[in-house]
Amino acid sequence: MPEDKSLVEHVQRDILQYISQNGTKDKLPKEQEFADMLGTSRVVIREALSGLRALGIIVTKRKKGTVVATPDVFSILKPIISSGLLDKHTLKDLYELRLMLEIGMSDFIFQNKTEKQMDELDSIVSEEDKLSKELSATDDIDKKYELAHKLTEIDVQFHSKLFEMTGNKSLMDFQYILRHLFTLYYPKINTDYHSRTLVSHISLFNILRTSTPDAFRMAMRLHLKTQFDNMGKIVNETCKQ
């Protein structure tokens, strides 16, 4: 079986090399033509093409045959990441990657942000402030959890908007498939949570509006400090779900 797998992978590389050398506009040779060209069986060719089709590299169209497509890299990752089958080490790597991206994208946010996006971010932090005050004012435990869940959703909206403001589609797509990692912690129902946050969303918004990429990058690092400090616990809890 490993030898067969190795042969299929080798044939896939040969087919990709053929595509690279012959362009992507014309339809690809038929299975038998590839088999004759590469000196292997149609069964191997069929499996190799099936793998490339699953990756979105080729598609088979009615009346057109098999043609080259533009693969959506992140659509391949989405079902894998959301499957619940990733181990602790992979989840930790992905979570670290999310933190790296957030701290490192400051220059792109400042370069590409628009007034419309700033207004939308303003609305998000205003809603967060309102919900936080409601959370502090209520003693009803069910209401606390309801408000805490809403605040978690606001947290997702805030950070998602920052990714959007970079103007980088690949980064936005990647953020979308990782967004469930934003919520891998229990809702914060304790009333002093926001007062203990080193840098709040409102502070980040004000820095983004009036300061520099370097100041925003430092503030984001402080804002994410609790995520760094609790990463092990977050990943462990995720693996239990």
Image (cartoon, rainbow, N blue to C red):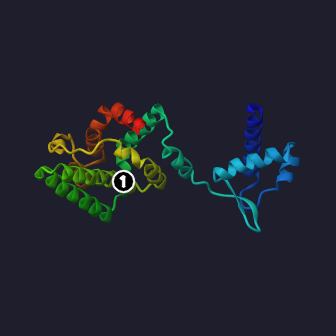
Whether residue 103 is visible to the viewer of this picture, yes or no, is yes
Counting from the top left corner in percent of width and height, residue 108 is at 38, 51
Q: Is residue 113 left or right of residue 138?
A: right
Packing grade of label 1 (10 A; few <14, some 14-19, many >=20) is some
- At horizontal 73% and vertical 44% (from top left) the residue drawn is 12
**225 is higher (above) or lower (below) than 161:** above
| Residue type of the residue flagged with mark 1 | Ser
Judging by the rendered image, the residue that carries numbered circle 1 is 160
Q: Is residue 40 left or right of residue 6?
A: right
Counting from the top left corner in percent of width and height, residue 155 is at 29, 51
Counting from the top left corner in percent of width and height, residue 160 is at 36, 53
- At horizontal 80% and vertical 44% (from top left) the residue drawn is 44
Counting from the top left corner in percent of width and height, residue 157 is at 32, 55
Quadrant location of the N terminus?
top right
Residue that protrudes farthest toward the bottom in the picture? 63
> Which residue is at the front of the view, 230 or 71?
230
> Which residue is at the front of the view, 195 or 14?
195
- Number of disc labels: 1
Quarter of the figure with residue 184 = top left
Quadrant location of the C terminus?
top left
**189 is higher (above) or lower (below) than 28:** above
- At horizontal 69% and vertical 49% (from top left) the residue drawn is 52
Q: Kindly state the secondary structure of the residue where label 1 is placed.
A: helix
Q: Is residue 76 left or right of residue 82?
A: right
Whether residue 110 is visible to the viewer of this picture, yes or no, is no
